[in-house]
Image: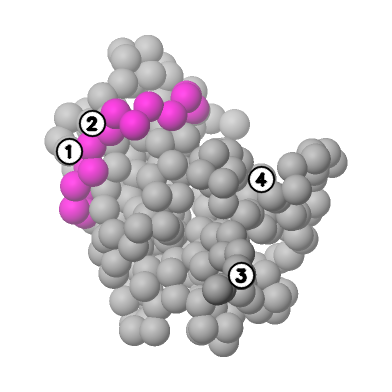
């Protein structure tokens, strides 16, 4: 009789200290997944959850193979800040950073990858005009990086990748009440919660849906979250 205990599902999360990364850790642990949380610096308080191990790495300079070795799936929750200087010249996290993750996964024969892109990569004609003008101008270079990242993923036949395309991200509890459709968020919707995005990504890592595809994710939010004042305030550091 085989008495071997199955190994727990192991999920490597890059960008673990960001809003989506933190939510992804929470969602993964709620599913009893083992988490390797990777970021450019170690947290001041790592907590006492034995299912989470924290590791320090720079995706732009470091060899990432140790961090993906033996993982069942990898999430990239990498992102950039919204200060004007960063948006004008964003670090190549989506391009060079994602490429480094992919190279490490290929070397270690890890296939499942879920990354964050944006619905606005495919269609920037979403939302009211007051939203589109500052968002599309301010994030133009970020969207260019995301588009290049998606092109690079399509050239990776060895990876089962998914590039999730949320709307304009916001705080808030996970809802499980969102719309997912191919490529672009529904017309009339603008916003996606970090927590919903993270939960969806963790689900994808486990079930293998939307492989080599770009699902878009959004939900209707209250006027307080979609008003010009709310969105424009979030575009200003």
Dot 1 corresponds to which residue? 186
Q: Quadrant of residue 228?
A: top left
Q: Are marks 3 and 2 in contact (CB under 8 Å)?
A: no
Check the image and name the residue furthest to the right. 44
Tell me whether circle 4 and circle 2 mark residues in contact (CB < 8 Å): no
Which residue bears the numbered disc 2? 189
What colour scheme does the image use?
Answer: one colour
Q: Indicate the secondary structure of the residue bearing disc 2.
A: loop
Which SS class for mark 4? loop
Q: Which residue is identified by label 4?
A: 17
What residue did someone put label 3 on?
4
What residue is rendered at 56% in x and 73% in y? 2
Alpha carbon separation for disc pair 2 and 1: 6 Å
Please name whichever residue, 49 or 110, is drawn nearer the observer in this view of the structure: 49
Going by the image, does 62 lie left or right of 150?
right
Q: Which residue is drawn at the image coordinates 37% and 69% (left, top)?
A: 161
Q: Is residue 62 above or below residue 224?
A: below
Dot 4 crowding, Cα within 10 Å, few <14, some 14–19, many 20+: many
Q: Note whether 26 is above or below 51 in the view shown.
A: above
User: Magenta region: which residues?
Assistant: 169-185
Q: Nearer the viewer, mark 3 or mark 2?
A: 3
* x and y, in percent, of residue 217 in the image: 29, 42
């Amino acid at each position: 009789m085989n008495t071997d205990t199955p190994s727990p599902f192991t999920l490597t999360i890059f960008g673990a200290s960001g809003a989506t990364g933190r939510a992804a850790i929470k969602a993964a642990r709620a599913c009893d997944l083992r988490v390797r949380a990777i970021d450019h610096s170690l947290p001041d308080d790592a907590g006492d959850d034995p299912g989470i191990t924290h590791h320090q790495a720079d995706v732009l300079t470091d060899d990432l193979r140790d961090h993906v070795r033996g993982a069942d799936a990898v999430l990239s929750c990498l992102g950039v800040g919204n200060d004007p200087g960063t948006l004008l010249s964003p670090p190549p996290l989506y391009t060079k950073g994602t490429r480094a993750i992919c190279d490490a996964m290929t070397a270690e024969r890890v296939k499942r990858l879920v990354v964050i892109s944006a619905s606005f990569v495919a269609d920037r004609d979403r939302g009211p005009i007051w939203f589109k003008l500052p968002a599309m101008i301010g994030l133009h270079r970020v969207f260019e990086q995301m588009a290049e990242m998606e092109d690079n993923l399509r050239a990776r036949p060895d990876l089962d990748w998914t590039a999730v395309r949320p709307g304009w991200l916001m705080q808030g509890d996970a809802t499980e009440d969102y719309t997912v459709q191919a490529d672009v968020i529904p017309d009339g919707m603008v916003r996606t919660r970090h927590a919903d995005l993270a939960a969806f990504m963790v689900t994808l890592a486990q079930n293998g849906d939307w492989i080599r595809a770009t699902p878009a994710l959004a939900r209707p939010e209250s006027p307080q979250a979609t008003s010009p004042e709310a969105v424009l305030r979030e575009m200003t550091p």
